[in-house]
Image (tube, helix red, strand yellow):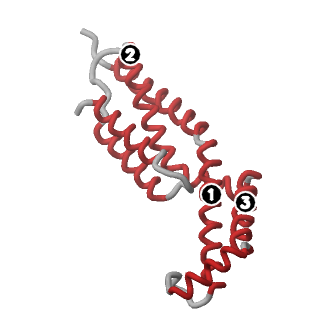
Amino acid sequence: MDRAALLGTALAAVVALSFSGEGAWDWLGATAGIALLTVLGAFFRLPAEGGLTPWLRGELAAFSVVAALAATLVIAPLLQTVLAATTDAGRTCHASAAVAAGALESDGSLQRGAELAVSRGDADVTTATDALSRAAANERRTVMGDCIGAVTSGWLWAPATGMAAVGYACAWWLVRRRHTRAPRS
């Protein structure tokens, strides 16, 4: 299999999943990251012969970066959960979501809009209060997701950089070890 094509395809998938929208990082993205790492592990092979040429070093770096980006898809929901529960930024996101939901529930024009939606049968609930309560809960989830997703994205560079460096070091060590073990002719 062509290693460059494999890396390019995996990178395109990571970019599509990472930048496909706003909101919280989700477990479907984590599952996709696991799938990408599995594909990379199954099909990417280091060359059997030759030393650490500049070309091979570049290829190892590219592989390490793509694998690290795929791994960020896996850790993003976990990191997001930790950030939401333990950081000031997470508390700010919770507060922003609560304020947005409260503003929606207390807005008089939205109350009249909820009454109109219920009277038309468009809200699938029986009272305007229930319709407004559901809309406020949705607004809370949306604001929280957008806020904590952005916070998490701002932190992901650190683990991605660390994983790429460790990946490159491990791949370099494997190639170096293979080269020193190879019988000399």
At horizontal 30% and vertical 18% (from top left) the residue drawn is 182
**Quadrant location, the N terminus:** top left
Instruction: Please give the name of the residue rendered at 32% of the width and 44% of the height, measured from the top-left corner.
Output: 39
In the rendered structure, the answer to whether residue 81 lies left or right of residue 168 reads: right
Lower position in the chain sequence, tag 1 or tag 3: 1
**Which residue is denoted by mark 2 in the rendering?**
52
Disc on res. 81 = 1
Q: Within 10 Å of the Cα at label 1, are there few (<14), some (14-19), or many (20+) other Cα atoms? A: some
Contact check, label 1 and label 3, Cβ < 8 Å = no
Compare marks 2 and 3 and give the one earlier in the sequence. 2
Is tag 1's residue or tag 2's residue first in the polypeptide sequence?
Answer: 2
**Which corner quadrant holds the C terminus?**
top left
Residue nearest the viewer, comparing 120 with 171: 120
Q: Nearer the viewer, residue 9 or 64?
A: 9
Q: Residue at x 65, y 54 (%)?
A: 147
Residue 120 to residue 103: above or below: below
Q: Amino acid at mark 3?
A: Ser
